[in-house]
Amino acid sequence: MSSHFFPIIVNEALPETGIDDKFFLFLFRATRIPPHIGLIFNGKVYDITLVGPNLGTDAVAFISTIKKKYTKTLFLELNKPNFSATEIETTLLEAMKKFNNVSQENSCLSPIKTAFHQLFDIQMESVNYIFDLIPLLHQKNIVQHVFHLNLERNLQENTFYLQTYNQNDIQQSIKALNRVNGIC
């Protein structure tokens, strides 16, 4: 593939059960530019959107919607950091509340960078995009497995090729979503 794609090796489809006590970084609408990024911890979704944060919404309902709408999604299962579940949840809540919503200044990656800096002690200065973060997570042995939903036709030899993007692509996506949602 061209150099405008970032390869991600995918282990298998997301299991039907057993995700409740796991920690995931997800790429929702993985084939779109840019994908939406968020976290699942202990069966709860944490992310920021244009209209505000999801602060521990039900992951089962989220995954059910992904399946129903056939939304192409990647799930990177992460090792749990050396904190209690309560401390992890508090860190995720605080990071999401700090940024509150996607804007011209903050992408959905912003609170994840803040949370991962605290939880995994990773330096995030050079991370601007998800394709900057994923190699760092692999380098630190934080990624356990990579699962997918609805990407069967997008895999080549168990590899998903994420199209890279830039800041302008993010801004254009935010503007388009604002128009669709009547926010601008």
Image (cartoon, rainbow, N blue to C red):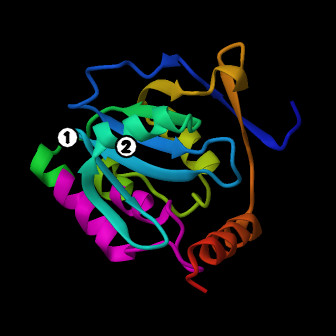
Residue 177's quadrant in the figure?
A: bottom right
Look at the image and say whether residue 54 sits in the magenta stretch. no
Q: Which residues are magenta?
A: 89-115
Q: Position of residue 150 (x, y in %)?
A: 58, 27
Mark number displayed over residue 71: none
Mark 2 against mark 1, which lies toward the viewer? 2
Q: Position of residue 70 (x, y in %)?
A: 56, 34
What residue type is disc 1 on?
Asn
Q: Is residue 36 above or below residue 148?
A: below
Q: Is residue 147 above or below residue 37?
A: above
Task: Please rate how many residues cluster around mark 1, counting C-alpha atoms within 10 Å: few if below 14, some from 14 to 19, many from 20.
Answer: few
Q: Which residue is mark 1?
A: 82
Q: Residue at x 38, y 63 (%)?
A: 114
Q: Is residue 40 above or below residue 107?
A: above
Q: Is residue 68 left or right of residue 179?
A: left
Most extreme residue toward the front is 68
Element under label 2?
helix
Report the Cα–Cα distance between label 2 and label 1: 26 Å
Look at the image and say whether residue 103 sits in the magenta stretch. yes
Quarter of the N terminus within the rendering: top right
Q: Which one is in front, 51 or 122?
A: 51
